[in-house]
Amino acid sequence: MSRMFTAFMPLTLIASILLATLVVNLSGNNSGLRSFTSYGELENFVKSRVIGKYLKEFFGDLNYWVESPYLSPRLSLGADAIGTLEAEYSTTNIQVSGVDEADIVKTDGRYIYMFSGRNIFIIEAYPPEKMNKVSEIKIKGNPIGLFVNNDRLAVLKYDSIAFKEEDYPCYRWVTVLEIYDISNINNPVLKKRVSTDGSYLSSRMIGRYVYIVATSPVIRIFDDDWKVLTPQVMVGDNVVNIPPNKIFYSDTIEVPESYTTIIAVDLYSEEGLEYKSVLTGYASCMYVSLDNIYVTMPKQFWVWEIEGSTEIHRIRINGLDIKCEASGEVPGRVLNQFSMDEYEGYFRIATTTGHVARILSEATSANHVYILDSETLRVVGRLEDLAPGEQIYSARFMGSRCYLVTFKKVDPLFTIDVSNPAEPRVLGKLKIPGYSNYLHPYDSDYLIGIGKETVEAEEGDFAWYQGLKISLFDVSNVTSPREVGKIIIGDRGTDSPVLSDHHALLFDKKRNLLVIPILEAKIFREKYSGDIPPYTYGEYVFQGAYIFNISPTEGISLRGRITHFENIEDLDKSGYYFNSKYQVIRGLYIGDVLYTLSSRMVKANSLTDLSEISSVRLD
């Protein structure tokens, strides 16, 4: 709706909407989540908040007209059984033990399940000498990820549904979960299809239950006609409107922009399904423990509200039991799921406020750690104003410690004590060139950082990123962290999916094994006369899996590389964008065999000497 339309909205409509806010049930307390009693109550709530926000831009404080009660101040990781082969195998790199995360590749120690385009291939991978493709599932829609749980394969995807609005053809996106029985691995059978309106946020699997979280819009405007929508769940072809007593809200919400819908699905029951929805802003991030889902959303309706805050909703989960229990709020914005954690009755979160700038005097950013009571989501402790002028690039909570990497010109790694929830405090920090996009625990005393090397700019308060950097940090002395291992791959333009997707990392401490898919770029210095500017990009020279040895005593060393390209000339060296069906996207191991996967190939190599054992093409 345009501002002009808002300004000339009929006063009778304004009055009716504002008056409607006076008749809504307001039982409960502000920290909790409560449900609606009717669709009429839901519609009045949404319209009063949304239209009220627009009106306030033109007419100031609406309390001058009416004191609205709504304007108050405020079992397993999947696939345990591997038959009689009994080979150890790697699992998806996840955040919380026992809480599996969807990925494009899964293994159960004998078979590999993977997306390739809009197909799912099932490959008998072990023993590697007999590796072969055993079955294929063609899907309609866009793939998201997979879960494997014994003889169930859960497939997540996007799809679209056609409908008509005033005789105009329209489409809406839905998030879909399809469950296949794979007890006969050669003939997977679709057992259940569950979908919900809107965009996929994230999902988890705990034991036999899959939890899906998706967001969908609250209002659709068609020819200046406002329609308050309700979230829908579809089981097969049966469409269910989520009833108002399963739609929750908090008094603190200023502008309800979307529904965040949580669906619990029992993989082994035809009837096993439950759902709830929370009226929120647009959900941006999610953290899940064994007992709770925490959904966060930026509370920034107008783009110029840079400071902003993050709204947090806690949903308790236990099998098919879903309870929307508490809401909270902290200043700043959240980077990703690793900026959050639940530990011994507390929820911890790291945020950044303000913005960074190439000129230090123009930067307003600062970084913070907040500790909340997990039951009420009320702040009980805070550590604020870390690294002014910088922003968080990676975070990791590990028990009573928090590790933060902020960046502007150099990489400060902060070690933070959060053992006393009321008084978190900085114990030490390490400043080195570069930054880490992702932090991964080696063990309780060592931390792996993966990011970029940098060179400080001669003008301005910033740095130019260069090649891929892998670091090993000794944090055993938390007051004095040290970088005890470091390796840099390539020059500016070198990239890895690990920098944006932690599922692409393969790490095994017992084997001192680290596997990372890398697209390497190299600057050929003989092609340049004089000094090479630090913003110069290299040319692509390799794509594939880099295999490293990593240990506290030996540091980080390259063991070898595996590629799916037959000739190095097959790499497209033009431009700054690279895409190929033969680019390695994941690595996993079964027994002493390393498997690398691209959209068109699975290759098996010995972990002992990296010699090739076999390969399968996925045509």
Image (cartoon, rainbow, N blue to C red):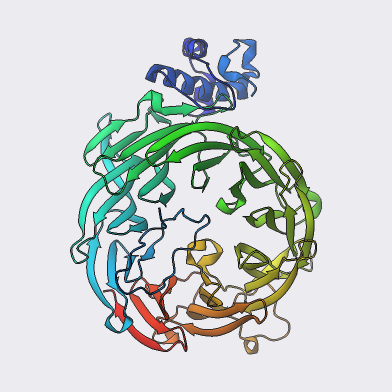
For the residue pair 326 and 121, the one nearer the viewer reads as 326
Q: Position of residue 404 (x, y in %)?
A: 69, 57
Q: Position of residue 573 (x, y in %)?
A: 49, 78
Q: How many marks?
A: 0
Look at the image and tell me whether residue 227 can be seen: no
Q: Position of residue 255 (x, y in %)?
A: 54, 28
The residue depicted at 73 percent of the width and 45 percent of the height is: 420
For residue 567, above or below residue 238: below
For residue 150, above or below residue 578: above
For the residue pair 18 and 264, the one nearer the viewer reads as 264
Q: Quadrant of the C terminus?
A: bottom left
Q: Quadrant of residue 410?
A: bottom right
For the residue pair 183 and 39, the one nearer the viewer reads as 183
Look at the image and tell me whether residue 39 can be seen: yes
Q: Position of residue 215 (x, y in %)?
A: 43, 40
The residue depicted at 70 percent of the width and 46 percent of the height is: 369
Q: Quadrant of residue 63?
A: top right
The residue depicted at 66 percent of the width and 47 percent of the height is: 351
For residue 11, above or below residue 539: above
